[in-house]
Amino acid sequence: IVFSKHYRGRVVSLCRRAQAWTLWLVKQEVCPRSVHAFVFCQCTHGKVDSVLETYDLYHSMYPSLSIGAQIGAQLDEVVRRVQPSMALELGMHCGYSSMRMLRLLLSGGRLITVEQDPQTADYGEELILVAGFKHHQFEVLTSSSSDAIPLLPERMGSHEEGFGLVLMDHDPAQYLTDLQSLEREDLLRSEGCSIVLIYRKRGAGRDIREYIQTREHCYCIKNDMQFMVECGHIVVFC
Ligand SMILES: C[S@@+](CC[C@H](N)C(=O)[O-])C[C@H]1O[C@@H](n2cnc3c(N)ncnc32)[C@H](O)[C@@H]1O
């Protein structure tokens, strides 16, 4: 009986992996339910490091949309340096990068994260709670970035100075428009804001680089890495 249970478990696991890879190869999609089930069942609840390690394990076995440990470590470095009291994420998926940022925010710091797919947003929010974060530390907005940005001024609470850090990992075709909307809504912290752009394809982001080059008095590229670009913005010079 033990023998047959062992093999049944392995067959189920192989079928799940085959299903996930088929979905990825055919539609370039990742099933958020599968990410949630894996992380929820295998991590130690209440321990953010365990939740992140379980995500990394998932990332090593299945196709995944999360930024992963390598880009995650680069993002950690930005969060540690910038120490934002208010951070914004566009493109939460199941919350991996949200949790990486949340665990490094100073006490009183908050994250607003935006995800357009309602089911994915629910799974992501639950995993952030599983990691031990509370609703006073983060808020999930379930809508497209273009609909969410005009609503952000009223979600800022006492943090009227704006966002010190913005992570864009949603749709690169939308990055420039969303950056311009954030400027228009006066949501970038005037003393300085780091905008982190994730690019998974080579050569992407030409439009935003050109935009930054034409506005050198208020933008600079602080870090230009293979999958991540960090731009600095200072409103007082704009
Ligand atoms: C690459 S994943 C984000 C991964 C996440 N940052 C992480 O590391 O776990 C992109 C996510 O952005 C969402 N998305 C795509 N376009 C969007 C938009 N315009 N507004 C809000 N969310 C969007 C997708 O549904 C998807 O869940």
Image (cartoon, rainbow, N blue to C red):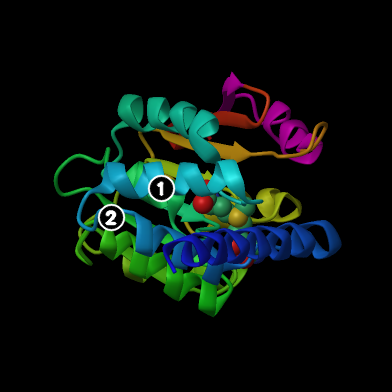
Q: Does ligand 1 reach within 8 Å of label 2's beta carbon?
A: no
In terms of depth relative to the viewer, which is nearer, 178 or 66?
Answer: 66
Give the left or right position of residue 57, taking residue 65 as reference: left
Return the x and y of residue 222 as percentages of the image width and height. Answer: 54, 20
Answer yes or no: is residue 100 visible: yes
Q: Write the residue at 79% across / 40% down.
A: 207
Please state the quadrant of the image where ligand 1 appears: bottom right
Return the x and y of residue 54 as percentages of the image width and height. Answer: 40, 47
Q: Helix, strand, or loop for circle 1?
A: helix
User: Residue 207, which numbered label?
Assistant: none
In terms of depth relative to the viewer, which is nearer, 149 or 129?
Answer: 129
Image quarter of residue 155: bottom left
Instruction: Tell me the kind of residue under disc 2.
Output: Glu
Give the quarter of the figure containing the N terminus. bottom left
User: Residue 160, which numbered label?
Assistant: 2
Return the x and y of residue 101 as percentages of the image width and height. Answer: 36, 43
Write down the region rendered in magenta.
205-224
Instruction: Tell me the kind of residue under disc 1.
Output: Thr
Give the left or right position of residue 24, taking residue 10 as reference: right
Q: Nearer the viewer, mark 1 or mark 2?
A: 1
The crowding category of the residue bearing disc 2, from other C-alpha atoms within 10 Å (few below 14, some 14 to 19, many at least 20), is some
Mark 1, residue position: 54
The crowding category of the residue bearing disc 1, from other C-alpha atoms within 10 Å (few below 14, some 14 to 19, many at least 20), is many
Q: Is residue 36 above or below residue 88?
A: below
In terms of depth relative to the viewer, which is nearer, 35 or 238?
Answer: 35
Contact? badges 1 and 2 (CB < 8 Å): no
Question: In terms of sequence position, does the residue under pointer 1 or pointer 2 come before the other?
Answer: 1
